[in-house]
Image: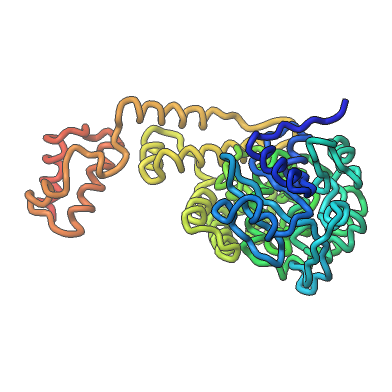
Amino acid sequence: MAFIMAIPDGIRRMMAELHENGFDAYLVGGCVRDSLMGIPPHDYDITTDAVPEEIVRIFGESSCTWYGKAFGTVCVRKFDAEAEITTFRTEGAYSDGRHPDEVTFAKDVHDDLSRRDFTCNAIAYDPRTGLLDPYHGAEDLAGGILRAVGVADQRFSEDALRILRGMRFYARFGLVPEPSTDQAMRDHAPELAHISVERVFTELCGMLMGDHITQVLLDYPDILSVWIPEIAPCVGFEQHSRWHDFTVWEHIARTVGHAPQDLTVRTAMLLHDIEKPSCFTLDARGGHFKGHAQKSAETADKILLRLKSDNRMRSDVTTLIDLHRFTPKSLADVRRLYGKLGAELFARYIAVLDSDRVSKWQGRAESREFLDRAEAFVRQIESEHLACTVRELAVRGNEAAALGLQGKAIREALEQALEAVITEQIPNEKDALLAFLREQANRS
C-alpha cells in the first residue's frame, strides 16, 4: 500500500499555493521521517524550486521571516501554520568543516536530496505523487539502519556535527549505523573538537534522552571522549567488586538507560562515577572507590562548565552526584534532605539511586526497600505537613530577636530548633519553640 502522509491543513495550503504558482513543493526531512515511523511531526520543512524572493511574493512579506538569502530559507507563518520553506540547493566544499563555502540554488529536487546527511532524512513527499526516495531511506528506516547519503567519508568530512546527529538518531530511533557509516563516524570523530560547544551540547542532550542511549554509550565512548576525555579511563576499567558485574563504563551506560527521561537525571548518571578510576584501590576484600562521589561531582562541574550547561542544571547535577552514595534510612534523614533539596530535586535524587541500584549486576538488582521507605516518608511529610526547613517552623526570626538573639545567632538558633523538631525532641508548636529559643538565648 502506498504511504499517505497526514498533513495539517495549513501546511497543505502552503504547498498548494506553491503548486498553483507553478513551483514544485515537497515536505522533506524530519517530518517525513517521523511520519514514516508513526511519530507525529513537531515541525514541517518544505523544499521548492521557488527562490526566496518568489516565496515572499507568494505568501506576502508580513507572513515571512527571511533566515538568510545565502541559504534560501524563509519561515512562513500563514493559514494558522508555520513551516520553513527552502529553495532546492547544492553545496560547495566545507572548508571549516561545518558550513558550505558556497550554496547554489537548484531546479531539481534530486540535487537537493543528494546533499543531505542520512538516507532517512533524504526522503521527500508530495501529496500529489507520494514519496520520492532515491536513496531508499524508507527501506533503511524499516530495517533500523542509519546510512549516510552517498559516500559516508565525504558526508562527515563536510560537517563533523553529523556524527553526533547520527548518534542521536541511533539513541532516539534505534537506527544502527551500517559499517561504512560507522567507520566514517569514528574516522572523523577528532574533527568534533572544532565544532562549537553549544552545538555539541545540544546534540548530547538530545542523545541522552533516547530510548536506546545505553547501546550508543557502549558503542561510541571513543567519540564522546573527544569532548569529554574523562570518559576514556572508565572504558574497560574492572571494578573487582562483589557489588558490580560490569566495568565502570558499562555500569555508567546502563544507569543512563535505566534513568527516567529527565535530562538532569540522565546527565547525572552519565557523570556520577566518572572519577572511579582515579579513586580505585585494591585489597584482599576487592576494589574500593573511596571518595569517588565527591570527586566525580567536582569533575562533573568542570565538564558542564566546559559544555556551557546552564547554571541550574550544573548545580543540580553536581548535587545529585555528590549525594549518590548516601541513602536516607530514617524519617529524620529524609526530612533533612527533603528540606535541603526541595520536592523536585529530591524526586530526582531518588531516581538517581534507583537507576544506580538496578545497573550493578546482570539480571538482578539490589532491594528497593530503603527507597520505598524513603518515598513513604515523603508521603508522610507531605500529608502531615512536617517541617523540613526553618521557614516551616511555627516561629519567625523576629520572635527569636525579641528573646535577645541577634544577627547570625538568630539563624543558628532556628536551625538548632529545626533539628530538634526533626529529631522529635520538641513539637513544631510556638510555645515549645519559644521555650527552646529562650534557652538558646540564655546560653549565648
> From where the camera sits, is residue 415 visible?
yes
Residue found at the far front of this picture: 21
Q: Quadrant of residue 107?
A: bottom right
Task: Point out the image quarter for the N terminus.
Answer: top right
Q: Is residue 66 above or below residue 351?
A: below
Return the x and y of residue 352 as percentages of the image width and height.
Answer: 56, 41
Q: Is residue 81 left or right of residue 122?
A: left
Q: Position of residue 223 (x, y in %)?
A: 77, 59
Q: Quadrant of the C terminus?
A: bottom left
Q: Position of residue 350 (x, y in %)?
A: 51, 37
Please say whether residue 288 is visible from this viewpoint: no
Q: In x, y percent, where is residue 197?
A: 64, 65
Choose top left, top right, bottom left or bottom right for residue 67.
bottom right
Judge by depth and name the residue closer to the eye, 107 or 297: 107
- Residues 84 and 160: in front is 84
* Residue nearer the viewer, 280 or 250: 250
Count of numbered circles on the image = 0
* Picture quadrant where residue 384 is located: top left
Q: Which residue is at a point 14% across and 35% down the rendered structure image? A: 430
